[in-house]
Image: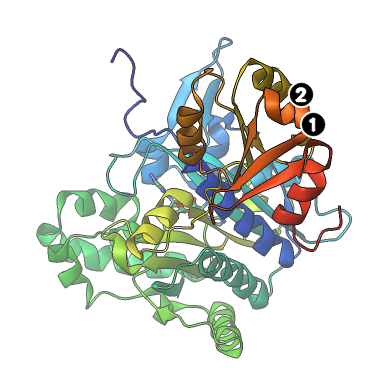
Amino acid sequence: MKYRAMRGTRDILPGESEQWRYIERVFSDTAGHYGCREIRVPIFEATELFERGIGEATDIVQKEMYTFPDRKNRSLTLRPEGTASVVRAYLEHSLGRRTGAVKLYYSGPMFRYDRPGQGRYRQFHQVGVEFIGSPDPQADVETLEILIGFLGGVGLRELETRINSLGCPSCRPAYQDKLQKELQSIGSSLCGDCRTRVDRNPLRVLDCKREECRALFGNLPVMLEHLCAECDDHMRRVEENLKEIRLPYRVDPLLVRGLDYYTRTTYEVHHGGLGSQSALGGGGRYDGLVEQMGGPPTPAVGFSAGIERILLSLEEEGASPDVEKGPDVFLAAADEAGEAEALRLAHRLRRRFSVERDYRRRNLKSQMKSASGHGARFVVVLGEREIGEGAVSVKDMKSGEQTTVDLESLEGWFGRALEPGCES
Ligand code: HAM
C-alpha cells in the first residue's frame, strides 16, 4: 500500500456514513426544536482569531493547532473548534441585529494535533450550538437540554452531566491567585505537566487526570466557594432550572475546560464506557468573547459534542443505530433482451425508488446472490419472455414470495408495497 490516511484521520465508509447522517439528522432536528438555525463557517481562519479567542495559554493554541502560511505568507489555521468562528461570523454579519439574540447550530470537521488514541483524533467532527445575546441562566439550561436531548435521541443511556462555575473577571483573578499560591506550595509533588501549568494557567492544573495529582487536589480552594454574588446567584438559578426540568446532574468543583473563554456556567456530559476520553460534549457560558473579538459586550453560551465519541459510546452500549438500507428494487436480467430493458426500466423506476443492478452480465444465480448481498427488498427478473408477456416476476426478499406484476403497473405495485398508506 503506497498511501494511507494520515495518522489521526479516518475514512468514514459506506455502512458508517449512514450512521453519521442519522446522528447529524437527530442533532439538527433537536436543535431545530429549540429554534436554532444552521450556520456554516469556513474550515480555516486567520490564526490570530483562534489565538485570541481560545486563549494563548491553552494547550490547543500552544501545541495543537494546524497552522501554516498561505501563498501570501498570511498565517492560517485549520479550525480546532467552532465557537471562535461562529462569533466572528456573528459580528461580521451583525447577526443579532433583527432579533437581539441568535441561536445557531453547526457541524463539521475540526483539527487538533493531539496524540491519537481511543476517542482522540487529529481530524474529528463536532456538532455544536451557540446562543448569543442572552445572559439568562435559562439559556445555559436550554443549551444543556439540547445536548442531553440529542445524546438521548441517538440512543445513549449511560450519561453523566457535570456542571461547575468558573466565575467572571471580577471574582476569578483573586481565586486564581489563591489557587496558584496553594499549587506552588505543593509544586514538588505535582507531575511535570502540572508544574508548567501552575505559572501559565493554574486552573488547568485541576484537569490533570493522573491519580497522584488528583489525590492532592482535595484540599485546594475551588472557584465555587469564591464566586461573587452575581455569579453565585447565576449558578443557583441554573441549578434551580435544572431541577425544574428534572435533568440529572452532578456539581463537579474540579471541572475546568480546555479553552479560556468560559465565564460562569461550564458543563460536560460524560459516558461511562469511554475510559479517559469520556467527555462526549462540553460547553458553557462565554460572556466576554464577543467583546474580546471587537464587538459590544454580549453574553453567550453554547456547547459542542464529538461525533466519533458518540459512535464509540453507542457501540459500547450495543446501541449502534441500524440505519443501513439496501435498494428498494434489484433488477436481474435473464438474457440480452432483459439487459436492454433493464436500463429503461431502471430509468423509469429510479424517479421514485432506489434501484440496483449487477452490471457484470453474469448468470441469473450470481445476480440473485448480488441482490441479497446488496440487501435488496425486491428482485425483478427481466428477460425476453417477460418482456413478450408484458409481466415480470417480483420476488419479495423478506418473505421469499413471488408475484407476477404487469410491467406497466410496477410503479404502483412497488408504491403500495414500499410506501404503505401512500396512494399511488
Ligand atoms: P471541547 O471540549 O474542546 O469544546 O470539545 C467538545 C467535544 O469535542 C469533546 O467533548 C469531544 O467529544 C470532542 N473532541 C474534542 N477533541 C477531540 C479529539 N481530539 N478527538 C475526538 N473528539 C474530540 C469545544 O470545542 C468548545 N468549542 C465547545 C463550546 C461551544 N463551548 C461553547 N460553545
**Could you tell me which residue is drawn at 38 percent across and 36 percent down?**
122
Residue receiving disc 1: 348
**Could you tell me which residue is drawn at 45 percent across and 80 percent down?**
249
- On screen, residue 388 versus residue 3, left or right, reads right
User: Percent position (x, y) of residue 230?
Assistant: 59, 79
Query: Residue 344 shows which numbered tag?
Result: 2
User: Percent position (x, y) of residue 133?
Assistant: 73, 62
- Residue 157: quarter of image: bottom left
Q: Kindly give the residue lying farthest to the right in the view shown.
A: 98
Closer-to-camera residue (103/8)? 8
- How would you rate the neighbour count of disc 2 (Cα within 10 Å): few for under 14, some for 14-19, many for 20 or more? few
Q: Is residue 31 above or below residue 333?
A: below
**Could you tell me which residue is drawn at 48 percent across and 51 percent down?**
307
- Residue 93: quarter of image: top right
Residue type of the residue flagged with mark 1: Arg
**Could you tell me which residue is drawn at 42 percent across and 69 percent down?**
174
Q: Is residue 227 above or below residue 395?
A: below
Residue type of the residue flagged with mark 2: Arg
Residue 101 appears in the figure: yes
Q: Are marks 2 and 1 in contact (CB under 8 Å)?
A: yes
- How would you rate the neighbour count of disc 1 (Cα within 10 Å): few for under 14, some for 14-19, many for 20 or more? some
Closer-to-camera residue (47/29)? 29
